[in-house]
Image (cartoon, helix red, strand yellow):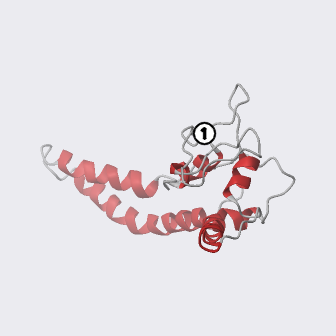
């Protein structure tokens, strides 16, 4: 596995700090025998914290998130673009639909949900209340609250021709 630039920067900074931290630690250890036995514990705790923080290798990497892929052959945009800009696309689509009355399928939340629906053990699509939900996987990982599904359905419709009243939000998950 190739380390990410941020991981390399952290490892390099730890390596650079070792000599800076090591010198005072060694001096402290040399002076420990000069202290009275009752004074030693007060100095040992900061010493242990310094050693554990700076001298041990930083190998606790963040967990890697691997979200499920959509059902289609390809997304409406490039994967990296969608990861960074999906919210702007959804907001733009919302403005086009709500404010201008223009309805398209390309960046439509309903189409996203249809393609990225994840099924449970029974083969039924899970709702946004389930941590396995496609949107929840990344949003939980990054601690970002999703409020789309307070009004919109987080599961695909059984039939794409179902009609609902536009004045009543759909919260049935």
Numbered-mark total = 1
In the picture, measured across the screen, residue 72 lies left or right of residue 24, that is right
Residue 108 in the image: state x and y as whole percent: 70, 60
Residue ID at (33%, 59%): 25
Say whether residue 59 is visible: no
In the picture, measured across the screen, residue 20 lies left or right of residue 103, that is left
In the picture, measured across the screen, residue 165 lies left or right of residue 72, that is left
Residue 23 in the image: state x and y as whole percent: 37, 65
Residue ID at (79%, 63%): 76
Q: Nearer the viewer, residue 28 or 99?
A: 99
Q: Residue furthest right?
A: 73
Q: Which residue is mark 1?
A: 127
In the picture, measured across the screen, residue 162 lies left or right of residue 44, that is right
Residue 61 in the image: state x and y as whole percent: 56, 51
Residue 54: quarter of image: bottom left
Name the element at disc 1. Answer: loop
Residue ID at (71%, 58%): 2
Residue ID at (45%, 64%): 18
Q: Nearer the viewer, residue 8 or 123?
A: 123
Residue 17 in the image: state x and y as whole percent: 45, 67
90 w.r.t. 53: above or below: below
Say whether residue 50 is visible: yes
* Crowding near the residue tagged with mark 1, few <14, some 14–19, many ≥20 C-alpha atoms within 10 Å: many
Q: Which of the image's four quarters has the C terminus?
A: top right
17 w.r.t. 127: above or below: below
Q: Residue furthest top?
A: 122
Residue 102: quarter of image: bottom right
């Amino acid at each position: 596995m190739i380390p990410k630039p941020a991981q390399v920067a952290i490892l390099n900074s730890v390596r650079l700090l070792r000599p800076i931290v090591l010198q005072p630690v060694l001096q402290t250890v040399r002076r420990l025998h000069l202290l009275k036995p009752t004074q030693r514990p007060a100095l040992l705790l900061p010493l242990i914290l310094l050693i554990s923080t700076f001298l041990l290798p930083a190998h606790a990497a963040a967990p890697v998130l691997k979200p499920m892929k959509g059902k289609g052959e390809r997304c409406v945009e490039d994967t990296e673009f969608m990861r960074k800009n999906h919210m702007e696309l959804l907001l733009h689509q919302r403005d086009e639909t709500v404010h201008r009355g223009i309805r398209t399928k390309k960046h439509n939340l309903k189409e996203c949900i249809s393609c990225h629906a994840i099924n449970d053990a029974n083969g039924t699509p899970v709702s946004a209340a389930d941590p396995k939900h496609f949107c929840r996987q990344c949003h939980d990982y990054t601690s970002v609250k999703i409020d789309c599904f307070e009004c919109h359905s987080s599961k695909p419709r059984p039939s794409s021709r179902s009609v609902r009243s536009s004045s009543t939000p759909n919260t049935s998950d």
